[in-house]
Amino acid sequence: MSENSIVLIGAGSTVFTPGLMNDLADNRVFDGWTVHLVDLVEDAAETMARVGRRIAAEKGADLTFVPHTDRREALAGARFVTTTIAVGGADGWRHDLEVPERYGIVQTVGDSVGPGGVLRALRHVPELSAVAQDVAELAPGALFVNYTNPLTANVRAITSTAPVDAIGLCHGTMHTLSKIAADLGIPAREIGATFAGLNHLCWLLDLRYGAEDLYPLLRRAVSERAGGADAPSTNEEGVHLPVSADLLATFGLYPAPGDRHVSEFFGHYLRGADSSELPWGLQGGRDDTIRYIDEKSDLWDRLHAQADGTEPLAPVDDGEAERLVDICAAVVTGREHVELAVNVPNQGKIPNLPAEAVVEIPAVVGASGVTGLGVGALPSAIAAVLTARAQQQEITVQAALTGSRELALQALVLDPLVPGLAVATSILDDACVAHGSTMDRFRA
């Protein structure tokens, strides 16, 4: 197999995969390359390959799309490997939300932290660790880029169990910066920003327009526009978000990527006297997650029609796949650029966070790969929040890799949204029933 190949494992991703194929077809660096689309569901891989061929034909791109159900068949000699798997699919995500809800724990997203994030990690970590070992064996020179959530735990599992060059990517900080720029009336491309922290709780350390410090302007905009605990329901990002405003007031820095994610790292934002609707304007984030899960089947209907040629190709504006294509192009051509945020092992880049933790920081990308940039120590209170979370995620990863029920319960109890061992036990037992064989190792 040619080394000029990109392998996408989890090709049934209904938004990311079409975006990736579109962006590859728009970039002449990848003319003559092969894209291997891997999914356990044969129809998903075949459908995406047909959509890809149609995209390439319409854009005049020299790309070959090959479907697979066996990842080892696709991996040999690959230059880049990307994972977007979802163990249990949309139904699995739904279970991660519904099981904790039986015990009064309502989450906005449930894919990274909270009990939903722990349950998701317990299923995804073993699979991604196995993928990493296959990559180390069959494509040892590949850059391994993971998108699967919970991103921090998954990248930690990948890098701790196999000698692979791996990073995690998420579009959250990019979207937050774009919204801040729009609210401040400054083109995003003209703003310099530095973010650092953990995925889905990443802090804006510096914000500049040339030499001008924009933080005073940001603080003023937040003060004028943000609501409080009784804010109306919303899922639109921007300086009006009440949880982000409260965290800015508490810790002195602005968080990313939006309230529906950052709220889940704390115990109090998702609790309120009125159980019919979440406080702090968070109900919109919860509703958006449920709506996204419910729309999965409709997306597949459209993709089948696009593959058959009975419906026009849909425009793709997510932007996340474009980052992957830009990174791959920089590695291939050696034309360096700086990425706003990548997820890599810390190893001192944030000196007051655990060395083994996976952190989200800026990076330089070029012929030598992806090099995370040190950002210095974070404010002590922020470091305390992130350290506690990183240590909980370390226990979660170890539970997932070993199949230890005891560690799985500890990981749940350590989450601020879980009130104690009795609830943690009930959540784990119910999840084992809901998720079936993917959670069998954690049964009592």
Image (cartoon, helix red, strand yellow):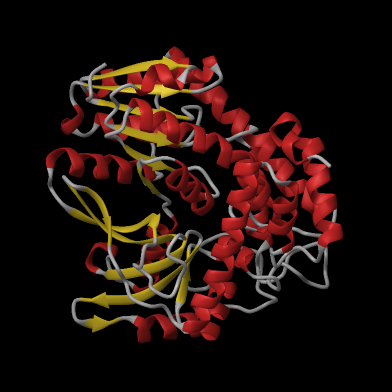
Q: Is residue 317 left or right of residue 369?
A: right
Residue drawn at point x = 58 percent, y = 57 percent: 393
Residue drawn at point x = 29 percent, y = 35 percent: 142
Residue drawn at point x = 55 percent, y = 78 percent: 247
Is the residue 392 above or below the residue 13 in the image?
A: below
The quadrant holding residue 297 is top right
Q: Is residue 197 left or right of residue 28?
A: right
Relative depth, front residue between 143 and 290? 143
Q: Is residue 111 visible?
A: no
Is the residue 299 above or below the residue 444 in the image?
A: above
Residue drawn at point x = 37 percent, y = 65 percent: 177
Relative depth, front residue between 30 and 52? 30
Q: Is residue 260 left or right of residue 304?
A: right
Relative depth, front residue between 108 and 365? 365
Relative depth, front residue between 324 and 405? 405
Q: Position of residue 193 (x, y in %)?
A: 30, 70
Q: Position of residue 281 (x, y in %)?
A: 65, 68
Q: Position of residue 287 (x, y in %)?
A: 67, 52
The quadrant holding residue 437 is top right
- Locate the C terminus by quadrant: top right
Q: Is residue 247 visible?
A: yes
Q: Position of residue 324 (x, y in %)?
A: 32, 42
